[in-house]
Image (cartoon, rainbow, N blue to C red):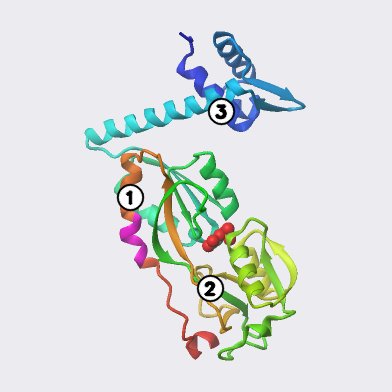
Amino acid sequence: MIQATLHQLKVFEATARHGSFTRAAEELFITQPTVSSQIKQLTKSIGLPLFEQIGKRLYLTEAGQELLGTCQGIFEKLDNFEMKVADLKGTKQGQLRLGVITTAKYFIPRILGSFCQQYPGIEVSLQVTNHQQIQRRMLENQDDLYIVSNPPQELDLCTQPFLDNPLVVIALKTHFLAGQRHIPISSLEGEPFIMREQGSGTRQAVQSLLAKHRVSVHVRLELGSNEAIKQAIAGGLGISVLSQHTLISEGIDSELTVLDIEHFPIQRRWYVAYLGGKQLSVITKAFLNYLLEESPKFSVPNLRPLSKSLVNN
Ligand code: PGA
């Protein structure tokens, strides 16, 4: 029987996740020599090396990978057990880990805010990142729930659509196309354009629509943030395509407007998703139900047909 303490397994898991003794030590608030000595003892009791060091980075050996999977299973079960106990005691407590794509940040923090008021004992971690990074987090089973617009087909996921996420063409109010109706998509040919980064779901959707209609825009700038793109449009660098939800914070004096281009908005939806084999904790189930109940409050007005007042606003 392998003699390993829970503490050693925690130290090992953090080291494996970060690929570094130093970063594991920082996360666990212990010293780096303590991390090394715990790993040394664990390696001795297992009888096989767990890491290989190449340059400054640590890589898991085959035994290390097996142990990492085992540790994650143990910690998940322990977390669930803790939450069940809290539930039996009548207090919802525990952790909720969410991984959401960038556009979901326009409503998820608000929903979380009211959810946390109901369950003040919970700890939330919210990771906001692009489609590709969410996919990586899914592969590594890093979160309890995910919010995506395009659930990866190749993963075994349980998904449920819950809110529309239309993508619209955004320009400066002084743009020559602003205020026109039913503009042909070919008018975008050669237009200075600000594109999201590689790995973004928005970018993928825009590129496939433009390719379908054989339109090529002139990409002047690539940016990894919806908010930065809005600033770049305001700065006169070009037009872009973003989720309509990115406009909710724009006031009446906003410099931006939506162009009425044919084939837009690109109709997309948000899905809440979790991994097929995942045992949902009590808190996760409570949040999932809350999200489905509350999210309709965050729907945006339908821009088709586009009213003149919206364009001119
Ligand atoms: P993105 O995803 O942040 O990867 O562009 C946004 C979306 O798909 O709505």
Let me know if residue 29 appears in the view: no
Mark 1 highlights which residue?
A: 117
Residue in the image at 57% along x and 83% along y? 262
Would residue 224 be visible to someone looking at this image? yes
What kind of residue is marked 2? Ile
**What residue is shown with label 2?**
266
Q: Name the residue carrying label 3.
A: 14
Q: Which part of the image, by quadrant, shows the N terminus?
A: top left
Q: Say which element carries label 1.
A: helix
Where ligand 1 lies, by image quadrant? bottom right
What's the residue type where badge 3 is placed?
Ala
Decide if residue 84 is on the left or right side of residue 76. Answer: left
Question: Which is more foreground, mark 3 or mark 1?
Answer: 3
Q: Is residue 62 left or right of residue 91?
A: right
Q: Earlier in the sequence, mark 3 or mark 1?
A: 3
Q: Which residues are magenta?
A: 291-296
Main SS of residues in magenta: helix
Measured Cα–Cα span from mark 2 to mark 3: 41 Å
**Image check: 192 left or right of 254?**
right
Magenta residue check for 293: yes
The disc labelled 1 sits on which kind of residue?
Gln
Placement of 148 over or under 5, stated as above or below: below
